[in-house]
Image: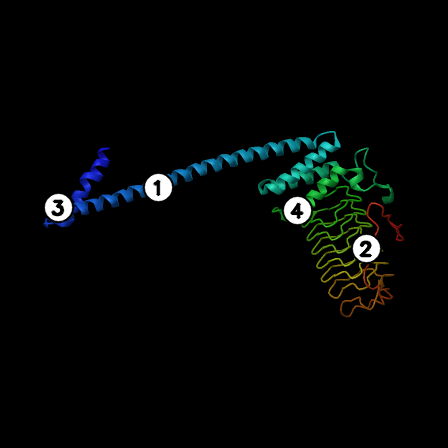
């Protein structure tokens, strides 16, 4: 009160007297000047009060936001812990629920996405090792037509694989490890697996229609009878892989490495193989009609019995006739994938090539 009395009673008169510097003015003019100073001081004090109130409100809002964030993080952590606990359940539906919960958390929390991707990859490696270890898994030598699709024989693993293929589209870490896993007859249509390590995995008859495998590592992988139609394998490493009877129709194979890969009976119609390396690859009886091999490396590649058409493009100075390629008519437009038999009922034809 003393300070306010000094500011609003004494100070205005002192300011006016200082400005007048001893000059004589009428009392009513001096009183008006003093009141004007008081009004100005009141406006300044009011402005300071408003600023202080705004600052206090902002601080309270920050404290509330920090508290809300801490509560949300605690809630996410609790959901994360419960979902991970569910993965160890003996009940299939509980494990599937845990995997879906982790998937949902990864979509909502970018901070936890990388950890969840690693958990899902580890779940697949431990539950589907190759060669098969558990009594419930089909043996390694069982014919592929006698093996049920992954979503039927291991529904939880199919959920984890699907979630992984969706979340990998927006991941930050460079590599995801799915090597040495049993993914026979898995459904990966349209999923994203860029820079994923599938080395030595068994992916026989897997569905990879329109999937993204850019820069994926597929060293010594088993992709017999796999459907890679319109998939992207750009700069992928498919060294020593087994792609016998695989379907690579209109597939992007640019700059991919197929060194010493077995591509016998593979269907590469209309595939784009610009810059692809087929060094010592086995392409016998492969369908190369309409395939663009104009800048591909075909050094020591075996092409006996491979089919080609007038639309097949070969490297300059490459004598495909001397290599044993059979020239035949072009098949024309490819049929719609909607007209193809579903993967659940598709039967892999027997291989004509020897093991």
Q: Does the residue at mark 4 contact the one at mark 2 (Cβ under 8 Å)? A: no
Q: x, y (%) of residue 125?
A: 72, 39
Q: Position of residue 29 (x, y in %)?
A: 15, 48
Disc 2 target residue: 263
If you read the primary sequence from the N terminus, does the residue marked by circle 1 or circle 4 appear first? Answer: 1
Q: Quadrant of residue 255?
A: bottom right
Please report contact status of discs 1 and 2: CB closer than 8 Å, yes or no.
Answer: no
Which picture quadrant has residue 76? Answer: top right
Query: How far apart in space, not on screen, are marks 1 and 2 (Cα)?
Result: 77 Å
Label 4 sits on residue: 168
Report helix, strand or loop for mark 3.
helix
Q: At x 65% / y 37%, what residue is drawn?
A: 102
User: From this viewpoint, is residue 111 visible?
Assistant: yes
User: What is the count of numbered marks?
Assistant: 4
- Name the spot of residue 7 as percent of width and height, x first: 22, 39
Mark sitting earlier along the chain (4/2)? 4
Where 305 sits versus 348, above or below? below
Comparing labels 3 and 2, the label whose residue is closer to the camera: 3
- Cα separation, mark 3 vs mark 4, equals 83 Å
Q: CA distance from mark 3 to mark 1?
A: 34 Å
Residue at the spot of label 1: 50
Measure the C-alpha gap from mark 3 to mark 2.
Answer: 109 Å
The residue pinned by badge 3 equals 27
Is residue 80 shown left or right of residue 275? left
The answer to whether one can see residue 262 in this image is no
Kindly indicate whether the residue at mark 2 contacts the one at mark 3 (C-beta within 8 angstroms).
no
Element under label 4?
helix
Tag 1 secondary structure: helix
Classify residue 30 as left or right of residue 229: left
Q: Which label lies toward us, 1 or 4?
A: 1
Q: Nearer the viewer, mark 1 or mark 2?
A: 1
């Amino acid at each position: 009160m003393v300070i306010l009395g000094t500011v609003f009673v004494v100070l205005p008169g002192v300011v006016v007297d200082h400005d007048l510097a001893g000059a004589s003015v009428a009392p009513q003019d001096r009183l008006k000047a003093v009141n004007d100073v008081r009004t100005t001081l009141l406006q300044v004090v009011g402005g300071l009060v408003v600023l202080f109130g705004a600052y206090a409100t902002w601080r309270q809002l920050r404290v509330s936001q920090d508290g809300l964030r801490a509560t949300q993080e605690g809630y996410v952590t609790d959901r994360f812990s419960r979902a991970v606990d569910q993965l160890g359940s003996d009940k299939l539906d509980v494990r599937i629920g845990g995997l879906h919960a982790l998937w949902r958390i990864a979509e909502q929390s970018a901070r936890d996405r990388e950890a969840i991707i690693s958990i899902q990859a580890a779940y697949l490696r431990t539950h589907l090792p190759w060669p098969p270890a558990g009594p419930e898994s089909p043996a390694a030598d069982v014919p592929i037509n006698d093996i049920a699709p992954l979503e039927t024989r291991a529904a939880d693993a199919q959920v984890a694989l699907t979630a992984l293929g969706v979340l990998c589209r927006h991941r930050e870490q460079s590599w995801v490890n799915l090597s040495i896993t049993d993914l026979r007859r898995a459904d990966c249509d349209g999923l994203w697996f860029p820079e994923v390590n599938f080395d030595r995995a068994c992916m026989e008859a897997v569905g990879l229609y329109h999937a993204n495998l850019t820069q994926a590592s597929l060293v010594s992988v088993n992709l017999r009878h796999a459907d890679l139609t319109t998939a992207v394998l750009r700069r992928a490493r498919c060294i020593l892989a087994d792609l016998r009877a695989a379907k690579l129709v209109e597939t992007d194979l640019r700059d991919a490495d197929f060194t010493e890969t077995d591509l016998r009976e593979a269907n590469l119609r209309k595939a784009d193989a610009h810059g692809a390396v087929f060094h010592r690859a086995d392409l016998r009886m492969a369908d190369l009609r309409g395939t663009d091999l104009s800048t591909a490396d075909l050094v020591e590649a075996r092409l006996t019995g491979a089919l080609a058409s007038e639309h097949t493009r070969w490297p300059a100075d490459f004598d495909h006739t001397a290599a044993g390629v059979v020239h035949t008519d072009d098949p024309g437009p490819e049929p719609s994938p909607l007209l193809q038999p579903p993967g659940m009922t598709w039967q892999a034809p027997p291989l004509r090539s020897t093991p």
